[in-house]
Image (cartoon, rainbow, N blue to C red):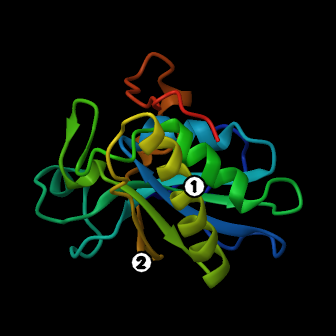
Amino acid sequence: MTRNHLHFVNGNRIKPPYPNDTEQAIFGLGCFWGAERLFWQQKGVFSTAVGYAGGKTLDPSYDELCTGLTEHAEVVKVVFDPTKIVYSQLLILFWEAHNPTQGMRQGNDLGTQYRSCIYTFSSQQQQQAEQLKYHYQQQLTAKAYGKITTEIKPAPLFYYAEDYHQQYLAKNPAGYCGLKGLGIKF
């Protein structure tokens, strides 16, 4: 849905084509505004974009997403240079930045759109995501947290969110961000 192809913070493209040496990742960890900011701040991240993925509605709007009927999650697409930041570093940020045990919610944000998810672009990404999930679950269990509910599967279609959502917290520094982890580090 976005018409603007340039990242508000760094000026790089948020839509293809991307530089040949980049890779992609998609993460859902609750409200996408704070998740996007977390990733765009990392050295080696070329660009980020927020959108919708994992549901059944074609090219949904934010209003449709909020009904809960689309089954999409709010996600952030991360385009990164693997010579500057590796996928496992992005996964660690993902696990530490939110509560992956809450099912269809993050804090006070309720519904399928706020679920924890990792959508992978290769078998290597899938394997790394599963391995780090296993290791993080061990740490959570030791601290008496429940089972990780994060959905991990191959990347479905990604639908760009509306322009006003892209890099929202850079455009609106006082905007809402409920993103917070459990304080458990790798």
Q: Alpha-carbon neighbours of circle 1 within 10 Å: few (<14), some, or many (≥20)?
A: few
Q: Amino acid at mark 2?
A: Pro
Name the residue carrying label 1.
135
Name the residue carrying label 2.
156
- Tag 2 secondary structure: loop
Q: Amino acid at mark 1?
A: His
Q: What is the x, y in percent for residue 15?
A: 60, 65
Q: CA distance from mark 1 to mark 2?
A: 25 Å
Between 11 and 179, the one lying in front of the other is 179
Residue 117 to residue 169: above or below: below
Between 91 and 85, the one lying in front of the other is 91
- Tag 1 secondary structure: helix
Rendering quarter of residue 25: bottom right
Q: Name the residue at 28% across, 44% down.
A: 102
Q: Quadrant of the C terminus?
A: top right
Q: Quadrant of the N terminus?
A: bottom left
Q: Seen from this angle, which residue lies furthest right?
A: 83
Which numbered mark, 1 or 2, is in the foreground of this view?
1
